[in-house]
Image (cartoon, rainbow, N blue to C red):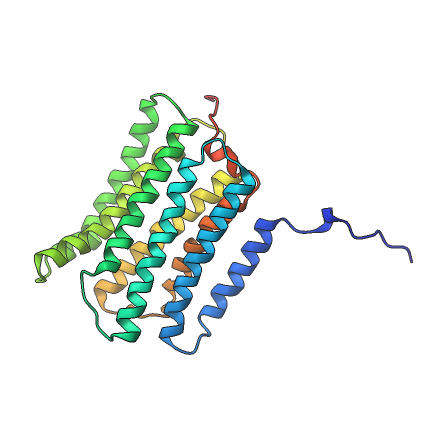
Amino acid sequence: MRTRPFTSCDRPPVWVVYACCCAIGIGLYFQLPSTAWQNVGYVVSNLVGLGAVVIGTRRGRPGSRSAWRLLAIFPAFTAAGNVVWLVNDNLLHIDPFPSWGDFFFLGGYVMLAAGLLQMVRARTPGHDRASVIDAGIVTTGFAVASWVFVMSPLASQEDALAARIVALAYPAGNVLVLAVGARLFAGPAARGAAYRLLALNLIVQLTADTAFAIFNLAGTYHTGHPVDALQLAYNLGWGLVALHPAMGELTRPQPRL
């Protein structure tokens, strides 16, 4: 029986291999023997995502690299925040709030929003009032729901003022990211595979962060909670978007449809 020789064309794309490895890694996370190791797993997911974004940017050579540099700061800042969490939780056995970790986590939201905004400017230059209105409608709806279910209960807690401000900054950060992301997705431009992966990753992130906030408010969150799967997925998902061969389309000026 004759068989066709193996060629490089038979190899799966890098982004597919990466996605499969990430799925396996998330499954292994829940098999780790202690919360300390799971906290380490969070840091690893951030570093893997960061490395994939850096490699993907070099491979894809997008027209505007500034957006990807800003996006790369997000997993870097989140990794730093998770290191602070790891040290406080497993080495010092303290739970300060706010802490330096919150500075890094919240700074990551700002960098992510800045990177997405840079994508908007590169992809759809000029003014687009209709897209702004559509994005505003989506953001307003999410902001109202966030206030009712997350922000209002946080504001009514009897914690110190600084703690309440920092706690409210987290859902506010999600609203900021959604506002810019919705503007990107509402633009009248072509929607390819990398575009859809980016949209999916943002949806997973907003869902995971909102669910985490609700479980945390209810006092039912713990390291190793099922919601961690979503958080790890979006940590790694930024690398998936960057490794996709069509990632350059996210910062390429698009013709109006």
Q: Residue 182 appears in which quarter of the rendering? A: top left
Where does residue 52 sit, x and y in percent of width and height?
A: 50, 51
Image location of residue 158, percent across then percent down: 8, 62
Whole-percent x, y for residue 14 in the image: 60, 50
Count the marks: how many? 0
Q: Residue at x 83, y 52 (%)?
A: 5
Q: Quadrant of residue 133?
A: top left
Q: Tell me if 6 is positioned left or right of 202 in this view.
A: right
Instruction: Classify the position of the N terminus by image quarter.
Output: bottom right
Left or right of residue 66, residue 172 in this image: left
Q: Residue furthest bottom?
A: 33
- Give the residue drawn at x 45%, y 36%: 65
- Camera-nearest residue between 41 and 19: 41
Q: Give the camera-side residue of 217 and 241.
A: 241
Q: From the viewer's perspective, is 96 left or right of 120? A: left
Q: Residue at left 45%, top 43%?
A: 198
Looking at the picture, how far across and down is residue 4, in whole percent?
84, 51
Q: Please state which of residues 103 and 127 is positioned toward the viewer in this rendering.
A: 103
Looking at the image, is 48 positioned above or below residue 71?
below
Residue plotted at (29% across, 54% down):
210
Q: Is residue 69 visible?
A: yes
On the question of residue 181 being in view, the answer is no
